[in-house]
């Protein structure tokens, strides 16, 4: 449930919408402003709980100001960028790349043979 709260100041009239959690408790109702657990009331009826919470919020916000502030979000580096180029001066790096390429060709050949066998078995069926 959303309730409108009117905040009158000398210079402006503004409304603040806030969500209220209403729970039926033993012997009455509890109303709590969502996100503000210290703004909570208990009452015999649901309507009375909402009215009391509205009065509590009016009193609490009487001499306050709600402002929005902007902060800069820190720029995060991609986690792998710290490793970029670490092997640029390694004399064995080209050998490692050649080994990786050879191993990939072997795996590709094995997979190709495996698929040929599957196709051959399928043709026999």
Image: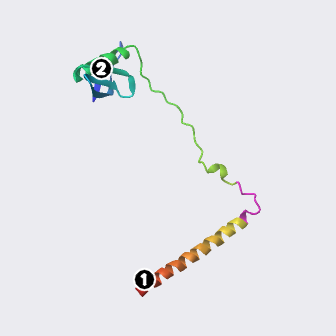
The answer to whether residue 7 is above or below residue 25 is above
Quadrant location of the C terminus in the rendered image: bottom left
In the drawing, does residue 77 fall left or right of residue 86? left
Question: Residue 93, located in which quarter of the rendered image?
Answer: bottom right
The CA distance from mark 2 to mark 1 is 74 Å
Q: Which residue reaches farthest front?
A: 26
Give neighbour class at mark 2: few <14, some 14-19, many 20+ (Cα, 10 Å).
Answer: many
Tell me if 98 is positioned left or right of 10 in this view: right
Q: Identify which residue, 36 or 5, lies in the foreground.
A: 36
Q: Which residue is mark 2?
A: 42
Give residue 122's mark: 1
Tell me which secondary structure the magenta stretch mostly adopts. Answer: loop
Horizontal and vertical percent for residue 90? 75, 59
In this view, 58 is above or below 78: above
Looking at the picture, tell me which residue is in the foreground, 25 or 54.
Answer: 25
Point out residue 112 in the picture as x, y percentages from the top left corner: 54, 78
Residue drawn at x 34%, y 21% is 40
Q: Position of residue 15 (x, y in %)?
A: 32, 23
Range of residues picked out in magenta: 86-94
Q: Give the SS element for disc 2.
A: strand
């Amino acid at each position: 449930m959303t309730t409108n709260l009117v905040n009158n100041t000398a210079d402006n009239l503004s409304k603040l919408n806030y969500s209220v959690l209403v729970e039926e408790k033993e012997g009455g109702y509890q109303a709590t402003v969502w996100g503000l657990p210290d703004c909570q009331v208990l009452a015999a009826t649901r309507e009375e709980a909402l009215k009391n919470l509205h009065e509590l919020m009016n009193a609490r916000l009487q001499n306050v100001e709600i402002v929005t502030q902007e902060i800069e979000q820190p720029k995060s580096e991609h986690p792998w960028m710290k490793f970029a180029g670490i092997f640029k001066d390694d004399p064995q790096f080209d050998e490692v790349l050649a080994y990786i390429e050879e191993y990939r060709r072997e795996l590709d050949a094995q997979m190709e043979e495996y698929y040929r066998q599957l196709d051959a078995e399928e043709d026999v069926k």
